[in-house]
Image: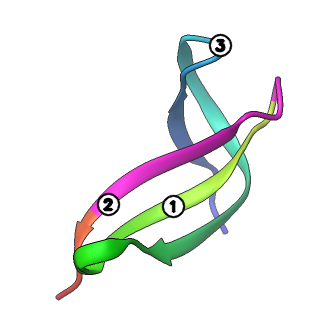
């Protein structure tokens, strides 16, 4: 999968996500879930509703 960029709240900047997987949140919203490539904190990037 291509590198997914998300906001890391611990680093307070945008970072590449490591081991990013697409997941479905409550209400059917899609998101990418992974870890920060620098500090290892869990990250989410909300993608939008399923079509």
- Decide whether residue 31 is among the magenta residues: no
In the picture, measured across the screen, residue 27 lies left or right of residue 11, that is left
Dot 2 falls on a residue whose secondary structure is: strand
Check the image and name the residue furthest to the bottom.
51
- Magenta stretch: includes residue 40: yes
* Label 2 – label 3 distance at C-alpha: 21 Å
Q: Quadrant of the N terminus?
A: bottom right
Q: Quadrant of the C terminus?
A: bottom left
Query: Where does residue 6 sit, x and y in percent of width and height?
Result: 51, 37
In the image, residue 33 above or below residue 35: below
Q: Earlier in the sequence, mark 2 or mark 3?
A: 3
The location of residue 48, given as percent across then percent down, is 23, 65
Q: Are marks 1 and 2 in contact (CB under 8 Å)?
A: yes
Residue 25 on image: x %, y %: 39, 71
| Separation of residues labelled 1 and 2 (CA atoms) | 7 Å
Instruction: Give coordinates of residue 17: x percent, y percent.
Output: 67, 45
Question: Taken as a whole, is the magenta stretch helix, strand or loop?
Answer: strand
Stretch of the chain drawn in magenta: 38-47
Label for residue 47?
A: 2
Which of marks 1 and 3 precedes in the sequence?
3
In this figure, which residue is indicated by the disc labeled 3?
11
Q: Mark 2–mark 3 contact, CB under 8 Å?
A: no
Q: Quadrant of residue 11?
A: top right
Distance from label 3 to label 1 (Cα)? Answer: 18 Å
């Amino acid at each position: 999968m291509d590198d997914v960029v998300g906001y890391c709240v611990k680093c307070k900047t945008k970072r590449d996500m490591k081991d990013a997987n697409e997941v479905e949140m409550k209400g059917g919203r899609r998101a990418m879930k992974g870890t920060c490539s620098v500090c290892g904190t869990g990250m989410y990037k909300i993608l939008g509703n399923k079509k």
